[in-house]
Image (spheres, grey):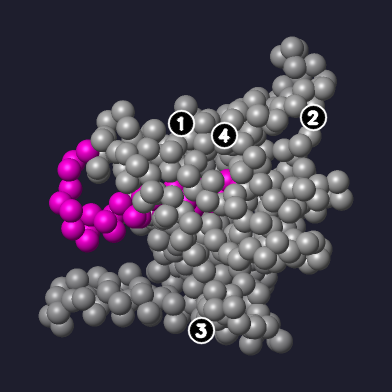
Amino acid sequence: MPLTERRLLWHGVIATFIQERLDAKLDKLKDDDAKRLELLAQHQYGAWIENAAKRVGQIQAVTHALKPIHPDARGTNLYVEPNQLPKLEVLGSHALGTTFAGDVVGNAAALDVYKFLRLELNGCSLLAALLAEDEAAMQALHDDPVQAQTLRDAFAALTQPRTGGPSSHPLAKQLYWLTDSDPCVDSHYELLAPLFPTSLAHVVHAHIQEHRFGEANKAARQAYYAHKANTGVFHHYPNLAVQKMGGTKPQNISQLNSERGGNNYLLASLPPTWRASAARLPVHSHSVFERLFSARPEVRKTLRQLRQFLASDPEPNQQTRQRRAAYIDTLIDEMVSLSGELVQTMPAGWTSQSVDTEDRFKELNRAEQLWLDPLRAQLPAETDFAQEWLKMDWPAEVGKRFANWLNHALKNQLPVGDAEAQQWQKALLVDEDGFKQQLRELRQRLDKQAMPEPGATL
């Protein structure tokens, strides 16, 4: 494209920007307001550009900023184009390449200058054109080559470090990084002052916004939860946190932070959640209810709530029965979870195994062995165990032991007896969605071995 034509195109883009700013301010004034003439003078093409060149020193273009570390920190910010950074295998600003959004920090009142420099023509920003000393862009600033060069240098200084050399601040973060082999030698450390990768954070924010609220991901999410087919990709960010920067004035942090409304996403970087080993076993115990089951957090919580509820002497009505039944259902669910965990984590036959020449589980009640180690019935040497399991006398015994355990847990504070125990046992044995369903599934699994069928029903 000829130089003259490109100069005119740049001139048109700039003139439109200045006119739009003027119109926005004039719309707020009455027709006879004396300030209108002042604004018209300020927004003359040449006058506005010269004023912008004076104010550009109040802001600085950056890709890595200090204020997000702490809003009151003062120190060095950096503008480094991502394609100039070392290429690493980890994610970093270098991954942005030539497509990135530069940020700006400084006086929020001068941010309009940066908006001016972000004006684009054919995909190239005015700032990038001036940094490359594009002749057409420079001529669009001023007809006089000397004055155009002066204006260009003023605007290009936006990306340069401030005079005085690198500096930090008491509110900025600093850390010592070991650069050699001996951590006991002070000279083997380098003092680092981390900066916030604002350009990278802006791209990450845009991606997550699209994944959270975009129509394509919305459709994929709906299909995922509805168990339906979808040709798209469902993006999900568990434990996503949102960091607010700048409070009610996010522009005081940076321009890009203002465009995000001060929102910055933090991906989950958490240590593993500690879980008690599912392989904890009733070693040298007569019953799993003695210690292992009673120690489960949800069991302790439910028992405490049940005691408090019954101790309050509630009215003998339907609401009371329903609430009491809900507590019992929770305990039964914990029984089902416990047995399921042991089936999944322990080898078949663990209740018959000896370790260190000591029968650790020999004392465990036989009915509970049948309940907690059902896959033992699949072992060739355990035909007697299989017959006992399929006979299905043992669930009633497990229910009785559960009822006795619950009565014992409540008896210190409440007058419970045989009637209550029968109620607890019945609740377990008729639990269609939990205990009985688990037994059915195991029964189907064991029946596939065509073991002798005693004729019992479940």
Please say if the residues under marks 2 and 1 sit with CB atoms less than 8 Å apart.
no
The circle on residue 354 is 2
**Would you name the residue on which mark 3 appears?**
12
Location of residue 208 with respect to 106 vertically, above or below: below
The structure residue drawn at horizontal position 40% and vertical position 69%, both measured from the top left corner, is 47
**Magenta residues (range):** 311-339
The circle on residue 287 is 4
- Kindly tell me whether residue 278 is visible in this rendering: no
Q: Position of residue 52 (x, y in %)?
A: 44, 62
Question: Quick one: SS at disc 1?
Answer: loop
Q: Which numbered disc, 4 or 1, marks the residue that appears first in the sequence?
A: 1
Q: Position of residue 174 (x, y in %)?
A: 58, 29
Please say if the residues under marks 4 and 1 sit with CB atoms less than 8 Å apart.
no
Question: Comparing marks 2 and 3, which lies closer to the viewer?
Answer: 2
The structure residue drawn at horizontal position 18% and vertical position 76%, both measured from the top left corner, is 29
Amino acid residing under circle 1: Leu
Q: Which numbered disc, 2 or 3, marks the residue that appears first in the sequence?
A: 3
Distance (Cα) linking label 2 and label 1: 62 Å
**Residue 338 in magenta?**
yes
Q: Position of residue 244 (x, y in %)?
A: 41, 51
Distance (Cα) linking label 4 and label 2: 18 Å
**Residue 192 in magenta?**
no
**Would you name the residue on which mark 1 appears?**
171
Q: Which numbered disc, 4 or 2, marks the residue that appears first in the sequence?
A: 4
